[in-house]
DNA sequence: GTTCTAGAAC
DNA sequence: GTTCTAGAAC
């Protein structure tokens, strides 16, 4: 496993080593050589995710900690990746993070005993939870733990400012399946009788970001999707499709409560907060029954995103990746969302959504 | 008058 | 992504 180094930019002291998922509190003191009273002795809590290559920074002190000029805010938490600059307090004391291969430095007892493997969760978030080790699907798990609906896991604090896909995927109540690589959740707004999302723990921002190295993961996602059908009581009478939206639809929206303060007049839109952007941009496989019998299917965009080439079959994505090493999305794909409403089964055009819904009933299995 | 959509706001 | 709503369509 790699290690994380926090490198001081202006008054160089030895880089501070952060171990995977071990919280470290930093502030005024001999370790940073910061004497500025504006900086609390416990200014920030840092936690590195050495597998994914970022750290989370929680501001503990009263005065502002910044990441690239954006205020974190007391009690809030953001992620910092290599290339970003963390200012401990008041735009001063810049640090960057670097991930390097393991050094001979003695490792913690917790880490010594285990082989290097991926972690199975995103960084922990939230309201001052001290440790999530007990319910993290941890590195030292015996062979991939595969579970169907698990009520036993302790819910992880969702964090007061983030919501959406990431929270759903980490909330055990939402999970219908999980293993060491993926988690399956029910879509919060299902567009059919059965609508699951298969999400990799490793965040991939969009189809564009996929490369050959992802082939195995995508094949696994498809297998897991197929597994969902096998345990679906209506699988024999409903048709299903497994695929991706050509352009990711899960929007990332900054939900920091003090977003206005963070903007600091820099014109940062709610859609551009780096911490949130990272958390919300996430490729997901739709496993959806073809009845489209759902009150959540409300408009043309919903319909066309599942019934035109905007919806790319999982096997096509995998084939493209194997053949070309990447996935290309045809120009004009977003225009497909505006096409007239056409029944996916008999191709009959329907004037409105309510009429389409009436029509779909004629195709439902008796 | 009601139904429905598209676009803005979130 | 959802919700809200003005105004188009009927």
Image: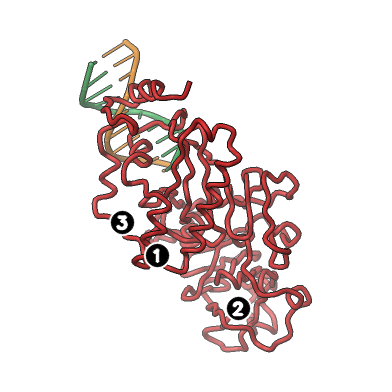
Chain colours: A red, B orange, C green
Depth check: give the residue in front, C5 or A346: A346
Alpha carbon distance from label 3 to label 2:
36 Å
Question: Could you tell me how far apart the alpha carbons at marks 1 and 3 are, in whole angstroms?
Answer: 15 Å
Query: Residue A363: percent from the left, percent from the top?
Result: 40, 24
In the figure, A100 relative to A300: above or below?
below
- Left or right placement of residue A110 versus residue A201 in this view: right
Q: Which mark is first along the chain, 2 or 3?
A: 2
Q: Do discs 2 and 1 belong to a common subunit?
A: yes
Q: Which mark is drawn over residue A329?
A: 3
Label 2 or label 1, whichever comes before in sequence order: 2
- Residue A58 pos. (x, y %): 62, 64
Q: In this rendering, which labeled residue sits more in front, label 1 or label 3?
A: 1
Depth-wise, is mark 3 or mark 2 nearer the camera?
3
Give the CA separation, mark 2 to mark 1. 33 Å
Q: Of label 1 and label 3, which has the lower sequence position?
A: 1
- Within 10 Å of disc 1 (Cα), the crowding (few <14, some 14-19, many 20+) is some
Q: Chain of mark 3?
A: A
Please name the residue that numbered disc 2 is placed on. A4
Q: Residue at x 63, y 52 (%)?
A: A178
Q: Name the residue that disc number 1 marks.
A: A322
Residue A207 visible in the displayed image: yes
Q: Is there any visible trace of residue A95 in the rendered image?
A: no
Residue drawn 37% across the image and 59% down it: A267
Q: Name the secondary structure under disc 3.
A: loop
Question: Could you tell me if the residues under marks 1 and 3 are in contact, i.e. CB atoms within 8 Å?
Answer: no
Image quadrant where residue A97 sits: bottom right
Specify the quadrant of the image occupied by residue A116: bottom right
């Amino acid at each position: 496993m790699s290690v994380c180094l926090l490198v001081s930019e202006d008054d160089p002291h030895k880089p501070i080593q952060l171990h995977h998922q071990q919280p470290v509190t930093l502030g005024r003191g001999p370790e940073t050589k910061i004497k500025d009273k504006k900086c609390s002795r416990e200014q920030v809590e840092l936690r590195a995710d050495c597998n994914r290559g970022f750290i989370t920074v929680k501001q503990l002190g009263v005065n502002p900690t910044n990441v690239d000029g954006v205020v974190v805010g007391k009690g809030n938490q953001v992620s910092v990746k290599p290339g970003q600059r963390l200012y401990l307090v008041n735009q001063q004391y810049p640090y960057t993070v670097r991930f390097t291969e393991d050094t001979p430095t003695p490792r913690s007892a917790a880490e010594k005993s285990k082989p290097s493997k991926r972690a199975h969760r995103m960084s922990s978030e939230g309201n001052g939870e001290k440790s999530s080790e007990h319910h993290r699907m941890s590195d030292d798990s015996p062979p991939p733990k595969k579970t169907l609906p698990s009520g036993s896991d302790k819910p992880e604090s969702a964090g007061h400012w983030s919501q959406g896909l990431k929270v759903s995927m980490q909330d055990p109540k939402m999970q219908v399946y999980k293993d060491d690589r993926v988690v399956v959740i029910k879509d919060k707004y299902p567009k059919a009788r059965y609508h699951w999302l298969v999400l990799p723990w490793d965040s991939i921002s969009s189809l564009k970001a996929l490369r050959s190295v992802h082939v195995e993961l995508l094949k696994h996602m498809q297998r897991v999707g197929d597994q969902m059908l096998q345990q679906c009581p209506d699988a024999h009478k409903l048709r299903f499709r497994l695929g991706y939206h050509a352009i990711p639809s899960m929007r990332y929206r900054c939900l920091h409560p003090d977003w206005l303060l963070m903007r600091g007049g820099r014109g940062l839109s709610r859609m551009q907060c780096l911490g949130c952007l990272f958390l919300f941009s996430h490729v997901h496989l739709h496993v959806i029954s073809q009845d489209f019998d759902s009150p959540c299917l409300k408009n043309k965009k919903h319909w066309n995103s599942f019934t035109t080439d905007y919806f790319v079959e999982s096997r096509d994505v995998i084939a493209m990746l194997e053949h070309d090493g990447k996935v290309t999305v045809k120009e004009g794909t977003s225009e497909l969302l505006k096409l007239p409403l056409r029944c996916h089964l008999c191709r009959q055009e329907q004037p409105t959504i309510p009429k389409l819904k009436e029509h779909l009933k004629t195709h439902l299995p008796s």
